[in-house]
Amino acid sequence: MDRHEALSTRQRILDATEQLIIDEGYAAVTVRRVARETHVAPALVQYYFPTLDELFLAVLRRSSGAEMERQHLTLDGTHPFRALWEFGSEPGTALITEFMALANHRKTIRAEIAEIAERSREAQLESLTRRAADEDLGLPDVPPIALLVLMTMVSRGIMMENSLGVTLGHAEALAVIENILATVENRSDSAHIDGVTETRAAGL
């Protein structure tokens, strides 16, 4: 098997595993089931991933890598806090929900999720801190990290509750978040306009 074929096979195994997790939950993932979905021998699945933990970790790391790339692009926009809010509110939390459930039973998954979450938050904070040097991001007396955690936790929490059919209080919470975002955006836009005006007045 050449390198290209090996990469293709590994990719198909990961694709099949991810889809199984989304469609049927992590408990549906077995070596034989993944092999059947991928149309390969079980021994080949174990060749690439000797244990189920290694298979789960590979899927989790691939997914988180893609999310980090999207997050980086998101933070380059005009209103990063709103972009992060919308990013976290997107449908498609089934995969991370399953991994969170799996983390209750597998320490390696729990440790990996914690590391990924910390790395993601650090990247978000670093980007927002750089932006804050040029614009008025955030709210008075509210640290950017606090606002960042609020955006993330509320959006994820609402999505997870929606998946269970729980909606009580969501409309009111969303209205509060919308007011916060509008305030942040107005401050940022005003700072940007003032900065442009000052620059033009200085003849730069």
Image: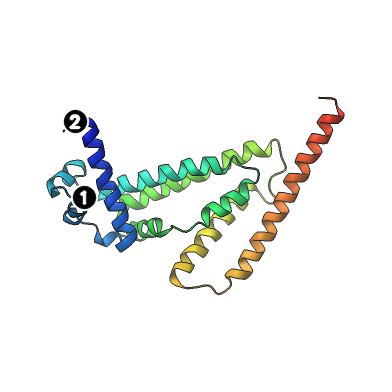
Q: Helix or strand or loop: what does disc 2 sit on?
A: loop
- Is 77 situated left or right of 14 in this image? right
Image location of residue 81, percent across then percent down: 62, 49
Q: Is residue 189 left or right of residue 203?
A: left
Image coords of residue 106 (percent x, y): 29, 55
Place of residue 178 in the rendered image (x, y in percent of width and height, measured from the top left):
66, 60
Residue that appears at 15% across and 44% down: 44
**Numbered disc 1: secondary structure:** helix
Q: Residues within 10 Å of mark 2 (few under 14, many from 20)?
A: few
Residue visible at 16% across and 47% down in the picture: 40
Asked whether the viewer can see residue 39, the reply is: yes
| Amino acid on which the number 1 mark rests in the picture | Thr
Q: Is residue 123 visible?
A: no
Contact? badges 2 and 1 (CB < 8 Å): no
Residue drawn at x 31%, y 58% as measured from the top left = 21
Which residue sits at x=62%, y=46%? 80
* Residue at the farthest top position: 204
In-front residue for pair 131/122 = 131
CA distance separating discs 2 and 1: 18 Å
- Examine the image and state in which quarter residue 20 appears: bottom left
Crowd around label 1: few <14 · some 14–19 · many ≥20 (10 Å): many
Say if 163 sits above or below 125 in the image: below
Q: Look at label 2 and name its amino acid.
A: Asp
Q: Quadrant of the N terminus?
A: top left
Q: Kindly identify which numbered label has been placed on residue 38.
A: 1
Q: Earlier in the sequence, mark 2 or mark 1?
A: 2
Front-most of residues 70 and 138: 70
Q: Residue furthest right?
A: 201
In the shown orientation, is residue 151 left or right of residue 52? right
Q: Which mark is residue 149?
A: none
Residue at the disc numbered 2: 2
Whether residue 174 is situated above or below residue 129 in the rendered picture: below
